[in-house]
Amino acid sequence: DADVTQTPRNRITKTGKRIMLECSQTKGHDRMYWYRQDPGLGLRLIYYSFDVKDINKGEISDGYSVSRQAQAKFSLSLESAIPNQTALYFCATSDSRVGNQPQHFGDGTRLSIL
Amino acid sequence: KNEVEQSPQNLTAQEGEFITINCSYSVGISALHWLQQHPGGGIVSLFMLSSGKKKHGRLIATINIQEKHSSLHITASHPRDSAVYICAVNGGSQGNLIFGKGTKLSVKP
């Protein structure tokens, strides 16, 4: 099983719908991140969480919200989806206890908003 | 100006060729990462380095802190190396990653 699991893997929905993307991890990491990736652009940070009670906005948080339900779960919500939120979304985790560490990514969720 | 610049954006090589991908950054960093993204979309961490050089199989990553530059080399390239290679630095306000736009590598048999 994957260490960082994203659901769903693909989603097509309509403008105005509420959407939730879920991320769970079995790595025991304290830090979790949500990114979006658009063609021709680098990964951009939406929100990040350093533990269950610590949630922070990233570079492009407008139109998104998050919930850290447990150390292992971090969900991303689009309250009212719009077409320019069509993108590939990644969840990632890292362990802060040993200094700089690589981030571990989920397989991504491809979201299309019509 | 982007804080992390990669070159080239696209690279096509013949199997067996030696490949170099470059990354320059303009911020102070604590570490630099090289990531690989396969056509299926998944992202894997290849290297994390803060000085010198690291080697894993046919892949070599180097960093020059003074020049704010890193290179990723692939020796004896193979079609299975075809992927997008992404440079990222720990340089955000809380050490978050800042990503380059990626280099798309295609290795032809």
Image (cartoon, rainbow, N blue to C red):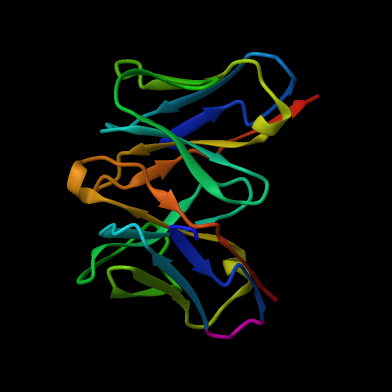
Number of numbered discs on residues: 0
Magenta segment's dominant SS is: loop
Please report the residue visible at 55 percent of the width from the left and 20 percent of the height from the top: B58
Asked if one can make out residue A111 in the rendered structure from this viewpoint, the answer is yes
Q: Position of residue B79 (x, y in %)?
A: 73, 29
Residue B6 or residue A27, whichever sits in front: A27
Spot the residue most to the front.
A1
Above or below A107: residue A85: below
Q: Is residue A95 left or right of residue B100?
A: left
Above or below B56: residue B35: below
Residue B56 or residue A55, whichever sits in front: B56
- Please identify the quarter of the rendering in which residue A61 is found: bottom left
**Magenta-tinted stretch:** A14-18
Q: Is residue B60 left or right of residue B13?
A: left
Please report the residue visible at 45 percent of the width from the left and 77 percent of the height from the top: A77
- In the rendered image, the quadrant that contains the C terminus of chain A is bottom right
A67 is within the stretch colored magenta: no
Asked if one can make out residue B1 in the rendered structure from this viewpoint, the answer is no
Spot the residue most to the right.
B109
Above or below B88: residue B59: above
Please report the residue visible at 48 percent of the width from the left and 82 percent of the height from the top: A79
Spot the residue most to the bottom.
A17
Q: Position of residue B73 (x, y in %)?
A: 54, 19
Q: Position of residue A56 (x, y in %)?
A: 27, 64
Please report the residue visible at 39 percent of the width from the left and 43 percent of the height from the top: B98
Q: Position of residue B42 (x, y in %)?
A: 57, 50
